[in-house]
Amino acid sequence: MRVLVVEDARALAEVVAEGLRDQGMAVDLAHDGLSAAAKIDLNAYDVVVLDRDLPGLHGDTICQMITDRDGDRAMVLMLTAAGSADDRVRGLTLGADDYLAKPFHFPELVLRIQALARRRPSARGRTLRAAGLELDPITRSASRSGVPLHLSVKEFAVLEALMRAAPAFLSSEDLLEQVWDENADPFTNTVTVTIGRLRRKLGEPAVITTTPGVGYRIAPAG
């Protein structure tokens, strides 16, 4: 899952981003409305965590920019220090999909982001299944043929991305974008290394196939 956190309080933004990364999400940051708008135009996000009071462009403008888009847009979780009922109504009227007042409990933020990601039109059901694998993004559990898998945060995120895309291929660039973030080095071998570790943990017969020049995918059944 790829998330954009738009928050002008840099210390809070960094804490939220690191916490979400620990949950296996790829997180980008923007500290003002103008940079947020540029990143939203450039990247495909599942969820945008959007502070309402932003310099440059107000959060309300960013929210409307997202919700006015055609197609499979990002879901918007609006944050604000103003927690009155009228403030929530105004935020939701602009098209925000959810609303969370500051200060908030981080576990609640995580659950709300996960719930919004599941509500996207392109999202599949909660439990992903392919080639004898089962993965639940909410409980962060995965198994093969009923045997639990003990995966690192990045291994889990890579497997989730591949299972969501199945039977299509994902390139190394796709995985860098979905599992890491905009700061990932495009020339790094981290995807290859993570896939290698994941394959060993998944065991035999291999379920992740590689096509040179195309990418990786979960092998179709049969």
Image (cartoon, grey):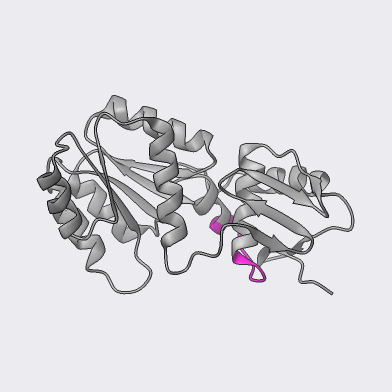
Residue 194: percent from the left, percent from the top? 69, 44
Residue 143: percent from the left, percent from the top? 76, 49
Residue 218: percent from the left, percent from the top? 72, 63
For residue 11, above or below residue 191: above
Q: Is 177 in front, or is 21? A: 21
Q: Main secondary structure of the magenta part?
A: loop
Tell whether 66 sits left or right of 18. Answer: left
Quarter of the view holding residue 7: top left
The answer to whether residue 170 is magenta is: yes
Q: Is 26 in front, or is 121? A: 121
Residue 86: percent from the left, percent from the top? 10, 47
Question: At x 64% / y 60%, what residue is drawn?
Answer: 128
Q: Residue furthest front?
A: 85
Q: Is 149 in front, or is 184? A: 149
Quarter of the view holding residue 172: bottom right
The answer to whether residue 146 is magenta is: no
Question: At x 61% / y 43%, what residue is drawn?
Answer: 140
Examine the rendering and report whether any part of residue 189 can be seen: no
For residue 66, above or below residue 11: below
Tell whether 90 sits left or right of 170. Answer: left
For residue 56, above or below residue 71: above
For residue 89, above or below residue 154: below
Q: Residue furthest right?
A: 204
Q: Is 200 in front, or is 98? A: 98
For the magenta stretch, what is the residue range? Answer: 165-174
Tell whether 154 sits left or right of 101. Answer: right
Question: At x 74% / y 38%, what residue is drawn?
Answer: 150
Question: At x 26% / y 69%, what residue is drawn?
Answer: 69
